[in-house]
Structures are given as C-alpha cells and as structure tokens.
Image (tube, rainbow, N blue to C red):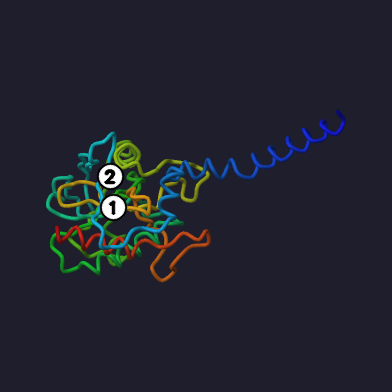
C-alpha cells in the first residue's frame, strides 16, 4: 500500500507539472487560431499544381462579409469595390510595435509582384480606428511604400471592424491592455477570389489551410518555432486565382 501511495503522488506531480507548462500554451494556440488550424499550417502543403480549395462553413462556401469603411483618401470603400478582383485581407494597426511591420513589409512585396495586375488588390482593416484616421493611414501608406490604388487601408466603427475580424473572417483581434500596443491580433492573411470567396491550397490531408502566415518573410524561411514562411505560396496562389 505504501508503494502504491507514492506512485499516486508521483503521477499527481507529473499531471501538475504538465498543466503548469503546457495548458497555457494550448490556450494561447486556441486564441491565435485553432489548434487544428495551426497544425494544418505546419504540415506540408500540396504542390502548386493542385487546384485551390474553397473554405467551407457548415458545408457552404465562405464569402467575404459586407463591409463599408473609409480608406486613406477618405473615400468610402465596400466589399463591392473588390468584385472581380483577387485580393488579400489583413487586420492591423499603424502603431503596432510587433507583427504589423513584418506583415505589411510582406504585403508591400506582394504589391510590387503584382503591380501590373489590374485585377489584384489588398484590404487592410485597422483595429484601432479611433487613432487610425484617414490622414494617419495616408501618412502610414506613404511611409511604407504602399502605392497600389487597389490597396485600401480602412478605418471606421471599432465594434464593426472587430466583428468583421472575429465573426466575419474568423481572424482573432481584440483590445488587450497588457499586449504590445494595447491590442492583440492574428498575423494571418486571407485570400479572396474574384467572386468574393475565401480560397486556399490544401494540406497533405486534403484540408484547406484557410489562412497564410504573414509574420515570416521569404528571406527568413522559418521562425524560431520552425513554422515555414507562406508568402511564396501565397504569391503562387494569387497567380492561380488571377488566371481563373
């Protein structure tokens, strides 16, 4: 009985240590994109010769939600302005001290790759619209080499933008006082086809990867966690949708 008693003690200690070390990491992974989603994005994606998949919700193709916001030129931009265009979606804020500079550096590279494509655009939604006024967004665009007329940096009602991120695109964004800059958000890009549907290539299991990592540059190749850059495959997939 004494030996069994000590065995139970050791098992309990192991469970406690596991909970202390790993459960916070699991919660963090859920908050930044479901575990399944991140695991899919860690496995090899299928060759670029395979057709792009539609992203489904309850068996239906997921379409871009309706939106209407002011851009950096104080012009009203809606989802209808992107009809007939392939475009990339991101959520960011100009005062972001962490991942946004890398994300927009990657998007500027994508912009330059497709500078001669009339049917390509980018939609960037600010999650700090109270600060990111059209004039602030205009200055940010000029400072960061954003020149494409179809790259709209958008601002508007904060609640509507956060709802668009979380409920519309399922891309995490929230005000968190302890986070750098006071906000926390996902560094993922969504790819939209000419008909307004979310598209992506599939993983080795045949499931859509859904989103593309925007926080690792092509030059980096991978980050400290071993996650591979996906800007190169995003460029390949944009080309594929432009040809549809």
Q: Residue furthest top?
A: 1
Residue 39 is situated, as x and y percent measured from the top left of the image, at: 45, 49
Q: Residue furthest right?
A: 2
14 sits to left or right of 56 = right
Q: Residues within 10 Å of mark 2 (few under 14, many from 20)?
A: many
Looking at the picture, does residue 163 appear above or below residue 38?
above
Disc 1 to disc 2: CB gap under 8 Å: yes
Query: Which residue does the image show at 31% across and 60% down from the upper left?
Result: 140
Looking at the rendered structure, the secondary structure element under dot 2 is: loop
Which residue in the protein does label 1 denote? Answer: 200
Quadrant (top left, top right, bottom left, bottom right) of the C terminus: bottom left
Looking at the picture, does residue 30 appear above or below residue 94?
above
119 sits to left or right of 161 = left
Q: Which mark is residue 209?
A: none
Looking at the rendered structure, the secondary structure element under dot 1 is: strand
Query: Which residue does the image show at 36% across and 58% down from the upper left?
Result: 45
Q: Residues within 10 Å of mark 1 (few under 14, many from 20)?
A: many
Residue 87 is situated, as x and y percent measured from the top left of the image, at: 22, 55
Which residue in the protein does label 2 denote? Answer: 55
2 sits to left or right of 242 = right
């Amino acid at each position: 009985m004494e030996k069994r008693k000590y065995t139970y003690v050791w098992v309990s200690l192991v469970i406690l240590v596991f909970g202390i070390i790993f459960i916070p990491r699991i919660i963090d992974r859920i908050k930044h994109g479901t575990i399944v989603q991140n695991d899919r994005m860690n496995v090899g994606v299928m060759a670029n010769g395979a057709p792009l998949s539609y992203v489904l919700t309850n068996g239906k193709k997921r379409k871009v939600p309706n939106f209407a916001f002011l851009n950096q030129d104080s012009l009203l931009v809606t989802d209808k302005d992107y009809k007939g265009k392939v475009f990339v979606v991101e959520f960011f804020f100009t005062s972001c001290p962490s991942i946004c500079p890398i994300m927009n550096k990657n998007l500027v590279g994508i912009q330059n790759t497709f500078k001669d494509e009339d049917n390509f655009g980018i939609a960037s939604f600010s999650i700090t619209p109270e600060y990111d006024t059209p004039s602030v967004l205009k200055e940010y665009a000029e400072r960061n080499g954003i020149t494409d007329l179809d790259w709209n940096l958008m601002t508007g009602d904060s609640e509507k933008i956060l709802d668009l991120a979380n409920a519309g695109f399922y891309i995490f964004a929230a005000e968190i006082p302890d986070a750098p800059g006071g906000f926390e958000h996902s560094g993922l890009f969504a790819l939209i086809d000419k008909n307004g549907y979310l598209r992506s290539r599939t993983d080795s299991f045949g499931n859509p990867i859904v989103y593309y990592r925007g926080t690792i540059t092509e030059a980096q190749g991978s980050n400290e966690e071993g996650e591979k850059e996906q800007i190169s495959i995003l460029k390949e997939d944009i080309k594929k949708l432009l040809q549809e």
